Image (cartoon, rainbow, N blue to C red):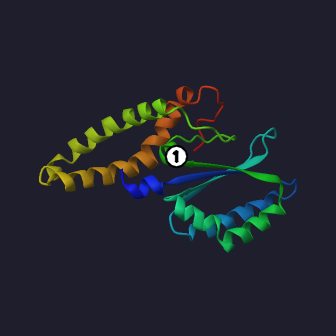
Amino acid sequence: MNTNLQNDPPVTVSVQRRVKPGCEQEFEEFLTGIINASMTFEGHLGTNVFSPTDPQHPEYLIIFKFDHQSNLRRWEESDCRRQWMARGEALTVGSPIFEVITGLETWFTLGTRKPMLPPPRYKMVTVTWLAIFPLVNVINILLSPVLKTLSPVPRSFVTTAILVPLMTYVVMPRMTRLFAHWLYPKVNYDSRTN
């Protein structure tokens, strides 16, 4: 594995906030502002917002993704974020609840209302293998005319350049939902979210 990725892995941060009654519209505007601000920072990969739909759980769940922990740190330590967080404080009740997930665990996130511990590593390895094995074979079969003409290193480069984004954005979110009951046996979740 690339040393840079070992020391500076991709990272996902989930934040739970409870909004003061009557401040929902202002909080939605605040979210638009802070998300737009975070998008201007290097390494920002996207943000998901899960608005409350259950009166029993009136918290918003906001998930930020960054390509490297160092880029997340730049965002978190910026004056821009500090100013936005100060605005958000006036609209919310209590302290925010943060959860930071790095490495392989970022592939195993569900759209739940509550932050969760990642599943056991053996389960993550099993589901990852079940996703990668057929995907590598499909890529090799579909691209065999092109891959045959390349030497081993460029062939691996092309294969992994296709494999990693597919795993991150397409395959693993679906595999996590498909195997959710096995990965998270004690969690109630909405499989339609995320």
Q: Residue at point 46% right, 55% down?
A: 7
Q: Residue at point 64% right, 30% down?
A: 187
Label 1 crowding class (10 Å Cα cut-off): few <14, some 14-19, many 20+? many
Q: Position of residue 100 (x, y in %)?
A: 61, 50
Q: Residue at point 79% right, 67% down?
A: 87
View extreme (left): residue: 149
Q: Position of residue 138 (x, y in %)?
A: 27, 40
Q: Kindly identify the amino acid type of the residue bearing the numbered disc 1.
A: Thr
> Vertical placement of 141 versus 186: above or below?
below
Please identify the quadrant where the C terminus is shown.
top right
Q: Quick check: 108 left or right of 162?
A: right
Q: Which residue is mark 1?
A: 106
- Given residues 157 and 188, the one toward you in this image is 157
View extreme (right): residue: 21
Helix, strand or loop for disc 1: helix
Q: Position of residue 157 (x, y in %)?
A: 26, 55
Q: Residue at point 14% right, 54% down?
A: 151
Q: Quick check: 11 left or right of 152?
A: right
Q: Position of residue 188 (x, y in %)?
A: 66, 30
Q: How many marks?
A: 1
Question: Residue 77 occupies which quadrant of the picture?
Answer: bottom right
- Given residues 55 and 159, the one toward you in this image is 159
Q: Quick check: 113 left or right of 91?
A: left
Q: Quick check: 125 left or right of 19?
A: left
